[in-house]
């Protein structure tokens, strides 16, 4: 049963702390997307990788956010320092090889106090 | 102007009725169109895709696309309480193979089906 996994599922932290979110893509699916979802903005694309190389991270605040894919089984999204406005659900998603179907992970619910 | 627009609702329909969800997009060159369903507290899941003008039916769901009007819709026939969710319209500006599935999402429409 191939699926995208994300950890942690929930994170509560204080403003100024570093937050690291992890994603395990479906094995063999070489493209990884990071989305952020809030009530106000909806689902926004932050960054995406293809074969571990960043293709587009224009949706990501560069001063505090960073995304990496150190190997084919792990993608990370870091926020340092975190701020209350970063509170959201962060989704990792894999498209299939045609690019037409996106498989979403369960999300990380982040609350920054 | 948002690239993909949906009426946020909530849209409330009685069980057994037809629910009609609408979406407009701004990029006339868009190639692929999708409807995702998201239950409260869950992640989005794909329910329909459509690429050419006209209707596409899958069970109780029908997607309709009109590229000239830049309009996509989703009809749910015989609505059930289990259809209550947020429905997200998504657009891929390029054919999937060239953009690797990069999607722009609408804000979503909240649908409630009451017994």
Image (cartoon, coloured by chain):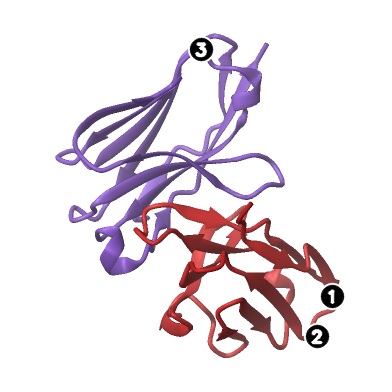
Q: Residue B98, how many percent across, how many down?
A: 26, 68
Q: Which chain is red?
A: A
Location of mark 2 (residue): A17
Q: Nearer the viewer, residue A22 or A58?
A: A22
Q: Is residue B93 above or below residue B52?
A: below
Provide residue A6's location: percent of width, then percent of height: 70, 66
Name the residue: 54% across, 16% down. Answer: B79
Q: Which residue is rendered at x = 48% and y = 83% of the image?
A: A52
- In the picture of the structure, the residue carrying the numbered disc 3 is B78
- Residue linked to disc 1: A13
Letter of the chain in purple: B
Residue A63 vs A75, above or below: the answer is below
Label 2 and label 1: CA atoms lie apart by: 7 Å
CB atoms at circles 3 and 2 under 8 Å apart? no
Between marks 3 and 2 in the image, the one whose residue lies nearer the viewer: 3
User: In 3D space, how far apart are the residues under numbered discs 1 and 3 (Cα atoms)?
Assistant: 44 Å
Q: Is disc 2 placed on a helix, strand or loop?
A: loop
Is B28 displayed left or right of A93 in the figure?
A: left
Q: Chain of mark 1?
A: A
Q: Residue at x 72, y 80 (%)?
A: A20
Labels 3 and 2 share a subunit: no
Residues at badges 2 and 1 in contact (C-beta under 8 Å)? yes
Nearest the camera: A1 or A36? A1
Residue A89 can be seen in this image: no
Element under label 3?
loop
> Are the residues flagged by discs 1 and 3 in contact, CB closer than 8 Å?
no
Q: Position of residue A100 (x, y in %)?
A: 37, 53
From the top left corner, tell me how far across and down residue B64 is, in percent.
29, 30
**Mark 3 residue crowding within 10 angstroms, few (<14) / some (14–19) / many (20+):** some
Can residue A77 be seen from the camera position used here? Answer: yes
Q: Secondary structure at mark 1?
A: strand
Q: Nearer the viewer, residue A47 or A84?
A: A47
């Amino acid at each position: 049963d191939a699926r995208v996994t994300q950890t942690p599922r929930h994170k509560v932290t204080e403003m100024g702390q570093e937050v690291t979110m992890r994603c395990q893509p479906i094995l063999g699916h070489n493209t990884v997307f990071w989305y952020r979802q809030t009530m106000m903005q909806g689902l926004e694309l932050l960054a995406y990788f293809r074969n571990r190389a960043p293709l587009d991270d224009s949706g990501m605040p560069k001063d505090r956010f960073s995304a990496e894919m150190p190997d084919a089984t792990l993608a990370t999204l870091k926020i340092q320092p975190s701020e209350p406005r970063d509170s959201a659900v962060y989704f990792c998603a894999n498209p299939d090889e045609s690019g037409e179907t996106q498989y979403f992970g369960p999300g990380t619910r982040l609350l920054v106090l | 102007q948002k690239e993909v627009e949906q009426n946020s609702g909530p849209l409330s329909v009685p069980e057994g009725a037809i629910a009609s969800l609408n979406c407009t997009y701004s990029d006339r060159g868009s190639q692929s169109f999708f409807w995702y369903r998201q239950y409260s507290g869950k992640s989005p899941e794909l329910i329909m895709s459509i690429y050419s003008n006209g209707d596409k039916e899958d069970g109780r769901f029908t997607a309709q696309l009109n590229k000239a009007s830049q309009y996509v819709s989703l009809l749910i026939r015989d609505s059930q309480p289990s259809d209550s969710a947020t429905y997200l319209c998504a657009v891929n500006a390029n054919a999937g193979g060239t953009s690797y599935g990069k999607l722009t999402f609408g804000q979503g429409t909240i649908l409630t089906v009451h017994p």
